[in-house]
Image (tube, grey):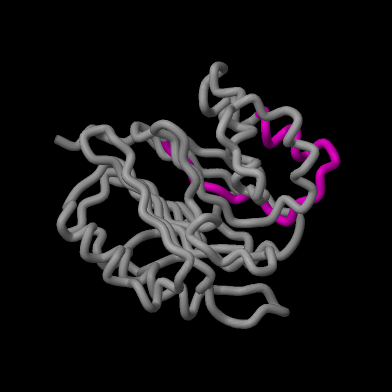
Amino acid sequence: MCRLLGITNFDYSIHGHLVDNFCELARSGVVMAEDPPGHEDGWGMAYYVEGKLVVEKSGESLLKERARVVEPLKRLGRTPVLILHLRKSAWKDSSSTRHAHPFHHDNVVFAHNGTVYEYKPLLPEITLPGLGGDALDTEVFFYHIMSFREHGLAPAFRQSVARIKQGLRYSALNCLFSDGTTLYAYRDFTKEPDYYSLYKSLSPSSSLVCSEPLDDRHEWVAMEKGEFIELPAAAIR
């Protein structure tokens, strides 16, 4: 239960206000009807510098650590792919840097909004080493995808989604992931469509995907249930 933001061809001088508005969702973002306000159970940020993935994350509320996102992005200036995540945990006593999103392996990064309640049946199918014994649903989902990466990242993702939808209980599989050259986005849910939302704003210069519209300058279009998009990013020199 989280908020997601992905931007291709990020330029702080152009997109800085979107980062500011997204940070504010830690306080004011949409929640499910029965939930208290706020997405303050951790945060994470991922971007690429000269093709190399950089991930920063924390188990603290972003409302307390906003400068840890804004200041590095100001200094960075530009990156081909940026992913930001705000966490609202579905798992008791799991607000920690260890369980904050996004998760990463090699140069691939993955962030999720939703809960795969029955994730343990995926564990025997994971061949990628390094999964922690305390891993929760999103990390297991990601390692399951990466176990099939020899088929390509997008086909591996589709294979994992198909496996989860073979009778495993979940609330939503909304996610953003990237290998540094492409931003991938997927929306799927079993309940609360107003909460488990993803919106896209696409242009030749930069593509945006977010859990909620962030401004009035862009045309935000709701992704359909089951929609999967691949958004190429330009190399930043």
Where residue 138 sits: x, y (%)? 62, 48
Where residue 179 sits: x, y (%)? 40, 33
Where residue 10 sits: x, y (%)? 26, 49
Q: Is residue 121 left or right of residue 181?
A: right
**Residue 71 occupies quadrant:** bottom left
Q: Nearer the viewer, residue 71 or 20?
A: 71
Residue found at x 75% / y 39%: 164
Query: What is the magenta range?
Result: 159-178
Up-down relation of residue 89 to residue 200 (above or below): below
Q: Is residue 14 visible?
A: no
Where residue 49 sits: x, y (%)? 23, 40
Up-down relation of residue 220 to residue 160 (above or below): below
Q: Is residue 160 magenta?
A: yes
In the image, farthest residue toward the front: 133
Q: Is residue 222 left or right of residue 237?
A: right
Quadrant in the picture for the C terminus: top left
Up-down relation of residue 26 to residue 14 (above or below): below
